[in-house]
Image (spheres, helix red, strand yellow):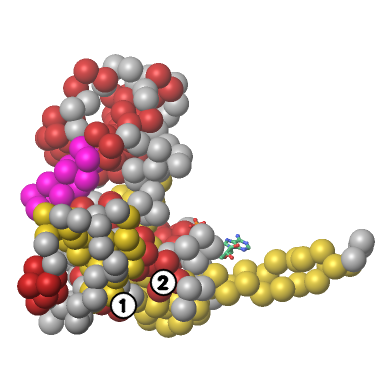
Amino acid sequence: MTAPLIDVRDLERTFVVRRKEGRLRRRAETVHAVRDLTFSIGAGEMVGYIGPNGAGKSTTIKMLTGILVPTSGHLRVAGLEPQKHRVELARRIGVVFGQRTTLWWDLPLRDSFDLLQKIYRTDPARHRANLAEFVELLDLGDLLDTPVRQLSLGQRMRGDIVAALLHDPEILYLDEPTIGLDVISKGRLREFLRTLNARRGTTLLLTTHDLQDIEALCDRVVVIDHGTAVFDGPLADLHRQGGSTRTLVVDLVDEAPPIEVAGAVTRRVEGPRQWLAFPSDASAAPVVAAVAASYDVADLSIQEPDIEDVIRELYSR
Ligand SMILES: Nc1ncnc2c1ncn2[C@@H]1O[C@H](COP(=O)(O)OP(=O)(O)OP(=O)(O)O)[C@@H](O)[C@H]1O
């Protein structure tokens, strides 16, 4: 078996903060930003890393990139210890922050990209080939001579993604890459990331509060809460873990009292329309058959579980 590309075991990071106590006194308090964190990611995986505010996501990413030193535990990225081999690691990873740019504000995009080639000492031919491919995929050709400060958020984000990828990293960390983007820009970005993964096998670790990013991109999710992983597995299993339900929406020919059938519970009635919840891992067929056998049905549809609800349920445990 090959070693995982990202290997995190019993990782811990604490911060000592001074909290005000009374008017003058301050008390030192230890914050466990990350504790007992264990997960590993294989080459080519696309993993969503999610959790509520303050769960420890940024602290984890900072340790993975070598910006922050762990308090204890085992951490390897591409076989390297990030804090000891920061420069070497920088060539193997790309980082994109949705909330801030790594581009030079007053320079045209093209100049930012040229500077990055010099900083990373990327082979010039390789740089040109990558630039041509990414500019085409992200439709940035007409914007190369525009200073970054004149770009829209979506255009700048595409520029940031190109900047993070020009040196051919194996791993791309994305921190809220679609924040503030409109639906079209989000869709375009997700499409690009899927293509990148399929063509080059780039490993993606994605932090986001937009669960549609996760649904569109990730086969696997790691959920972190209070610094520790509370779930690690396929998205479909997350639905099961959360005990989530699917909903059968029934339009009756006439208004009726709440439907009573085995295997489902009627949650809502509005005129002739009723909403019946049933377990998401059960088949809808028996519920549909039971409803159709006893009621005059005009129409039926099934709503899949809302991942936001599943996650809310998981956090609240
Ligand atoms: N430099 C620091 N000094 C003190 N406490 C910190 C520091 N950085 C993070 N923390 C604390 O560690 C915990 C985890 O923070 P972190 O930023 O990793 O969470 P997050 O999951 O990224 O949150 P968000 O979704 O809001 O970005 C929080 O309680 C935070 O206040």
Q: Is residue 111 above or below residue 11?
A: above
Side of 163 relative to 191 (left or right): right
Residue at screen point 12% across, 47% down: 195
Q: Main secondary structure of the magenta part?
A: helix
Residue at x 77% of width, y 66% of height: 19
Q: Which residues are magenta?
A: 187-202
- Look at the image and say whether residue 194 sits in the magenta stretch: yes
Q: Amino acid at mark 2?
A: Glu
Quadrant of the rendered image containing residue 32 = bottom right
Residue occupying the point 51% across, 73% down: 226
Query: How far across and how far down the image is residue 232, in percent?
Result: 30, 75
Q: In the figure, is residue 184 to the left or right of 286?
A: right
Q: Which residue is mark 2?
A: 313
* In contact (CB < 8 Å): disc 2 and disc 1: yes
Q: Earlier in the sequence, mark 2 or mark 1?
A: 1
* Residue 147 position in % (x across, y down): 38, 19
Q: Is residue 216 above or below residue 155?
A: below
Residue 243's tag is: 1
Q: Where does residue 276 sit, x and y in percent of width and height?
A: 25, 68
| Mark 2: few/some/many CA within 10 Å (<14, 14-19, 20+) | some
* Residue for point 36% across, 60% down: 308
- Tell me if residue 293 is in the magenta stretch: no
